[in-house]
Image: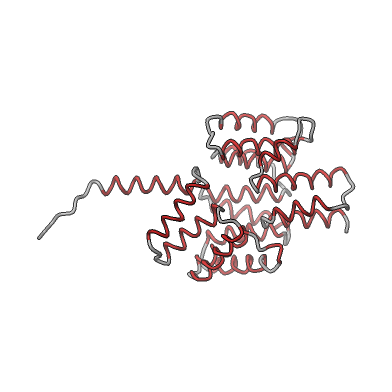
Amino acid sequence: MDEESILFGVRNLFAVGNYQAVINEVSSSNGLFSTEAKLEAKTFLYRSYVAQGKYNLVINDIGDNNEAPLKAIKLLAEFLADKQKNNLSNAEEYIAKANAFIEEGANRINSVIQVTMATLLVQADNLDAALRILHSRKNKLECCALAVQIYLQLNRLDLARDEVQSVKSWAEDALLLQLMEAWVGLRIGGEKYQEAFYIYEECAQSNTSQTIKVLNGQAAVNLALGRYPEAESLLMEAQTKDSNDPDTLINLISCATLTAKSQEVIQRYVSQLREVAPNHPYLQDFDLKSSLFDRSASRFALVDTA
């Protein structure tokens, strides 16, 4: 198998969230010879370890003499390790480091560095700065995918749709492009729900693609289509792969609410989410809305008319 075929498979495995398969493939492959191919494979290796939460492994493995893309991944791992410990006091320092790093040499046009530093800024809730880093993203599929996710977080569906249309002009039938279409389709609704369903169904056909990420995508589409038992089954399967995955827990909360499960069941999922991801944006929004509801409710009193 030639280098491009190996890297093509690695890119697709990473896109669907099969991080262990990426690690196994890169660690066992003997078909990468060029410096560029070896570096790309290494970036996917360490990004997969980051995605698995193995931050210290990445921090210890990557030294000051490594290539810039690897040092960018190390900086992301350091930030996420601190965030995991709820040590957010130095978030501004990490933001400054990311912005400074992107300005060094040719880092601003390196797609791995762009997507890694933009991911750090997204995790630091600095979406505008992340988009600035991704400004130069022509023919950089992962940068475009992250831009679409940011636009959706900002409720700029129009810009997300435009981004997908632009990528279609050069990415053809890339797997990551299909996933981008599914993300946007879930926000558009209507007949786009069914299109998103088919995209995730196709992704799930391969044994290497039955990942938590894909299962949650399938579940989200089924929830949107009102197919609650199917959604719940997919989420139960995702839980067997990782019982503490935040996306799975959030979708289980939605599914339990839509299927009128007891408040005890819903609260159990919420409590588990608080334990594994206490700073998750979902919880921040949940707590804000609960506070606003309680404040509004306190203005009214029930009157006993008996």
On screen, residue 280 versus residue 145, left or right, reads left
The residue nearer to you, when weighing 143 against 156, is 143
Q: Quadrant of residue 36?
A: top right
On screen, residue 290 versus residue 177, left or right, reads left
Quadrant location, the C terminus: bottom left
On screen, residue 229 versus residue 263, left or right, reads right
Q: Residue furthest right?
A: 33
Q: Residue furthest left?
A: 306
* Image spot of residue 23 (x, y percent): 75, 51
Q: Quadrant of residue 108?
A: top right
Number of numbered discs overlaid on the protein picture: 0
The residue nearer to you, when weighing 284 against 176, is 284
Tell me the residue at 53%/70% (across/down).
230
Tell me the residue at 48%/69% (across/down).
228
Tell me the residue at 72%/59% (across/down).
174
Q: Quadrant of residue 50?
A: top right
The residue nearer to you, when weighing 114 against 71, is 71
Tell me the residue at 57%/61% (across/down).
185
Quadrant location, the N terminus: bottom right
* Image spot of residue 276 (x, y percent): 52, 47
* Image spot of residue 297 (x, y percent): 26, 49
* Image spot of residue 79 (x, y percent): 61, 36
Colour pattern of the rendering: secondary structure
